[in-house]
Image (spheres, rainbow, N blue to C red):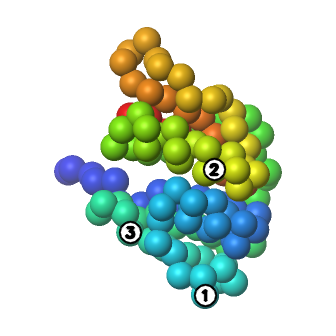
Amino acid sequence: MAVKLDMVGIVVSDMKRALDFYRVLGFEIPEEDNGHPHVEIKHDGVRIAFDTVEVARDVYGSWDEPSGHRIELAFRCESAEELNALHLKIAGQGYEVRREPWDAFWGQRYALVADPDGNLISLFA
């Protein structure tokens, strides 16, 4: 039996705030989705779902607020210049920067930011 990654689910405390962050990353998400408790988008064949805490509580039977680093989403940029520009755009919108862009020893340009719920977002080129 083979399995295929089909969807990544993200629990959000404020749907509009979360969707606005992912819009800054370049995802096309209709504004009318801001008020929905569950939103799905498709990106390069993978679905990304956003669920409110209330939906998560209903699905999982309970909800404990996570603490610490649990998962990282990594997004490839086309170039170091594109990464730098996206990083500035994210920082300029007031989102949390965890680490400024740097040239990593493994040969990539890299930066770390956090979405509004504290999920670690890597940008690399």
Relative to residue 64, is residue 77 drawn left or right? Answer: left
Question: What is the three-letter code of the residue carrying label 2?
Answer: Ile
Determine which residue is flagged by label 1.
32
Question: What is the three-letter code of the residue carrying label 1?
Answer: Glu
Helix, strand or loop at mark 2: helix
Q: Residue at x 52, y 38 (%)?
A: 84
Determine which residue is flagged by label 3.
42
Looking at the image, residue 8 lies above or below residue 38: above
Query: Which label's residue is closer to the chain start, 3 or 1?
Result: 1
Query: Which label's residue is closer to the chain start, 2 or 3?
Result: 3
Looking at the image, residue 38 lies above or below residue 2: below
Q: Nearer the viewer, residue 48 or 104?
A: 104
Q: Is residue 61 visible?
A: no
Determine which residue is flagged by label 2.
90
Helix, strand or loop at mark 3: strand
Question: Disc count in the image?
Answer: 3
- Nearer to us of marks 2 and 3 is 2
